[in-house]
Amino acid sequence: MPRVQAASGSIGDIELVRRALARDETAIRAIITTNNRRLYRLARGILRRDHEAEDVVQETYVRAFTHLADFRGESSLSTWLSRIVMNEALGRLRRERPGIELSSLPEGTLEAQVIRFPTASTEDPERSMAQRQIQHVVEAAIDELPEPFRLVFIARMVEGMSVEDTAELLALKAETVKTRLHRARAMLRANVEKKIGPVVMDAFPFAGRRCAGLTHAVMTRLGYGQTV
């Protein structure tokens, strides 16, 4: 269990932990809902299986709330929880494949930008379906990245963590984080290009309401206002 010394943690985190230790249900719920997405993504980045990632996140919260008094605020509460979920997920993976470790690679440089997947629109089901297809392609390509690259990619580009926070979380040098991100992006780009062919045929959909609306507008301009 990671133990954090007192120093520079967020006052908000310290107060939230204090309230959670006093069994304040609102504070406990706030900790969980604030960190659910990040912890799930990190766990899934290691395990690549949805249900196991959920199990690991649940176990992480149990361990974290059992040892919440160990939190002293040197790192953020989110980083502290992220370390626990990483340990839990890697522990499960190592039980399945003994000897697995995160290998070191040469150093280099490249900065990241946060990936923002498009939000599906309930008013445009055709476009929503195309967006989901593309998202599935990207998720599958991320799953196929080798683990050292996948974890850096998820931390930096999916979660938007800084180089420094990612380096701290994964116990790497900042330059190694940048190099792995660069390699991960190159591998992901090549993989997506191979997978995107069938999906791109459904790009720029124009059916359903959009098609009907345009048809109606044209028919109206042509003097067929009542035509459906």
Image (cartoon, helix red, strand yellow):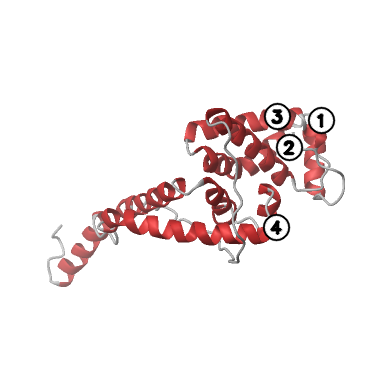
What residue is at 77 percent from the left and 48 percent from the top? 75
Q: Tag 2, which secondary structure?
A: helix
Tag nearer the camera, 4 or 1: 4
Return the x and y of residue 37 as percentages of the image width and height.
Answer: 57, 43
| Residue 105: quarter of image | bottom right
What residue is at 58 percent from the left and 43 percent from the top? 42
Tag nearer the camera, 2 or 3: 3
Q: Are marks 1 and 2 in contact (CB under 8 Å)?
A: yes
Q: Are marks 3 and 4 in contact (CB under 8 Å)?
A: no
Q: Residue furthest right?
A: 6
Q: Along the polypeptide, which appears first: circle 4 or circle 1?
A: 1
Q: Tag 1, which secondary structure?
A: loop
- As measured in the structure, the alpha-carbon distance from the residue carrying label 3 to the one carrying label 4 is 25 Å
- As measured in the structure, the alpha-carbon distance from the residue carrying label 2 to the one carrying label 3 is 17 Å
| Mark identifier at residue 27 | 2
Q: Nearer the viewer, residue 34 or 75?
A: 75
Instruction: Identify residue for label 1.
Output: 22
- As measured in the structure, the alpha-carbon distance from the residue carrying label 1 to the one carrying label 3 is 17 Å
Q: Along the polypeptide, which appears first: circle 2 or circle 3?
A: 2
Tag nearer the camera, 1 or 3: 3
**Left of 214 or right of it: where is 79?**
right
- Three-letter amino acid code at disc 1? Ala
Q: Residue furthest bottom?
A: 221
Q: Tag 3, which secondary structure?
A: helix
Numbered disc total? 4
Instruction: Identify residue for label 3.
Output: 63
Instruction: Identify residue for label 4.
Output: 164
- Three-letter amino acid code at disc 3? Arg
- As measured in the structure, the alpha-carbon distance from the residue carrying label 4 to the one carrying label 1 is 32 Å
Return the x and y of residue 165 as percentages of the image width and height.
Answer: 69, 54
